[in-house]
Amino acid sequence: MDRRKFLSTLGLGVAAAGVAGCSQTDCGPEGEQSSSKKWRWKLVTTWPKNYPGLGTSPERFANLVRTMSNGRMDIRVFGANELVPPFEVFDAVSRGSAEMGHGAAYYWKGKHVAAPFFTTVPFGFTAQEMNGWLHHGGGQELWDELYAGFNLKPFAAGNTGTQMPGWYNKEINSVRDLAGLKIRMPGLGGEVIKRAGAVPVQLPGGELFTALESGVIDAAEWVGPYNDLTFGFHRIAKYYYYPGWHEPGPTLELIINKTMWDELPEDIQAIIRAAAAWANQDMLDEYTARNNAALIELQERHKTQLRRLPDDVLARLKQESDTVLAELVAGNEFASRVYDSFLAFDKGVRNYTQVAELSYMNARAALTGE
Amino acid sequence: MDRRKFLSTLGLGVAAAGVAGCSQTDCGPEGEQSSSKKWRWKLVTTWPKNYPGLGTSPERFANLVRTMSNGRMDIRVFGANELVPPFEVFDAVSRGSAEMGHGAAYYWKGKHVAAPFFTTVPFGFTAQEMNGWLHHGGGQELWDELYAGFNLKPFAAGNTGTQMPGWYNKEINSVRDLAGLKIRMPGLGGEVIKRAGAVPVQLPGGELFTALESGVIDAAEWVGPYNDLTFGFHRIAKYYYYPGWHEPGPTLELIINKTMWDELPEDIQAIIRAAAAWANQDMLDEYTARNNAALIELQERHKTQLRRLPDDVLARLKQESDTVLAELVAGNEFASRVYDSFLAFDKGVRNYTQVAELSYMNARAALTGE
């Protein structure tokens, strides 16, 4: 029996609920209104509706919030261009025309140069390191500070794990092989390959296959085996390159209009916070499982040839990455603070990872011949 | 204004809520009772009250559930021996004398030989791989099936990341150096070192320091830098060994009495599920950040000497581990099914990790000289 029926049973109309007379902002978490008030929110995303992994995750997030709140917080998810174009998600949520958004901070570098640090930067953190920095290393506090200036509250809400640097028809045996190569690679990774001699091309995912097939581009970076397999890149490109120096552990974000967030009761805030954490882990778990199965299919069924970027190419990319990041933050006090925090955590966590996860995985690989 | 006050304002006593007349099991998630009914549950743990990381995590879990449910689900956390001894947590929750428990599945090997697979096994999964297997690789379904036989519902609710195989005063340069060495190492890891010639000793954490200091044991394994530093092992042992072959990514568990779980409304179930996922990630994030800082302190301030187990020792331990696991599941249909699922996921995920996280981390380490 719901509240409406219950009050009706008592001979009271639903309007009676109004006598408590508490507005959204006045109601504490313990208030009657907080358990009967309902919200219908819009979540706009930078992904095609229900795109595997990236787009299905915010749908699951919304379902979890709906169930946990017993229907009080009802979030409707919109794919890219359904309400706003993908790259207007930030502005739409900032001004409140949608209450929530899902995307990636590095899309908003034009808003602030520090934004990419909250998704991923070249030669940056793995997913586990990123989560450690955000949640117990000071990262979230810096992210909150940055986004508060845009009236936004951010949460980590997904991670793809280490991505793949893409599909090539030409082998890369030295830095010289990058010269003039038209490679689809957005963001800071694109800036890095440009300085190493390549020509970065910006293209939305939906145009990649045709561009690569027709030779408009020479190579294409997308996500990883799970998403790349469904695009069919293996049918038009010979080599699948690793490792993912350009996006070693990208965090996807949930953003919320801060004015509206601040007005939510404590229980609904906690529900959204926990659902974002659930989504943050669930997406990584899903990619870990599905990339694994997709890579087997690519190798065994489609005979995709894996290639590792040579050491000298990686060394040059690392060198250019350091320069690009230093130039990015130069002269900006806040961005410099973010970079300092990133570098301090990075130094320590690499030192630790070296004796923990990395050392273990290397020992296992050596012992099992894989 | 709470419900009691609201009804009182309308001239109705709280008893009126009873007219809906729905018992705990009858109420659907949409029912009025589900938003007014309160639960006061007990969560018993295998950890000392508020033990850093392992013990503070269930406290945070309980706080999050309390906030999300607006106080309807009120969980009180008990440390080891406060209500039941640590190794009676499983039975206590199974029979319902406590509604919830927090510990590790490998403590319950005596209940079923398959249990350790749901925490960690020697040369098994890292935290990320384990989460992938549990949540998108069939692991959770097997875990549910196993624990349902004990009237329990399990969730992953914490992970320490790759542990450290411990503190030694003698250098291990070959398998021969293990002969007769009394090493505190519980569970399957202990069984493995026994077959490699060492003498595994079972001791609770609180007795480790004195036992190692007095020479009752020659070496001690505990968790990792964060927890080990607070015990002060660096004051009485020269060498800190890696990598953590014995516990590469142990999952801690939340267990719930299944009869009581099944009677919960859908919203409270979802709240508990999300809070467990939050705790699962938060503990790993915390260990990732704090192990990192603790290792720096051990190395720089206390001059702790790190040592890597030699390749031939690791090879012998791997060989014994394979034997121990095969013997463990032999003749048990369910355990064999779990092992098959584990092996299938393991093969695929190692193949993928090799080109993703592992390859990236190795490239980064080579380029930064760490």
Image: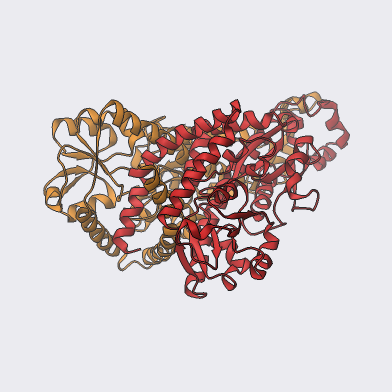
Chain colours: A orange, B red
Q: Nearer the viewer, residue A4 or A249?
A: A249
Residue B93 lies left or right of residue A121; in this view the side is right
Residue B140 lies left or right of residue A124; in this view the side is right
Residue B166 falls in image quadrant: bottom right
Q: Nearer the viewer, residue B244 or A165?
A: B244
Q: Position of residue B94 (x, y in %)?
A: 75, 36
- Residue under the image location 28 percent in, 44 percent down: A242
Residue A26 lies left or right of residue B288; in this view the side is right
Residue A287 visible somewhere in the drawing: no
Q: Is residue A291 above or below residue B278?
A: above
Q: Position of residue B229 (x, y in %)?
A: 58, 67
Q: Is residue A330 above or below residue A200?
A: below
Q: Position of residue A96 (x, y in %)?
A: 47, 44
Q: Is residue B217 above or below residue B142?
A: below
- Residue under the image location 30 percent in, 42 percent down: A164
Q: Position of residue B268 (x, y in %)?
A: 68, 36
Q: Is residue A355 above or below residue B153?
A: below
Q: Quadrant of the C terminus of chain B?
A: bottom left
Residue A17 falls in image quadrant: top right
Residue B299 lies left or right of residue A194; in this view the side is right
Q: Nearer the viewer, residue A296 or A15?
A: A296
Question: How many labels were placed on the picture?
Answer: 0
Q: Quadrant of the N terminus of chain B?
A: top right
Residue A204 visible somewhere in the drawing: yes
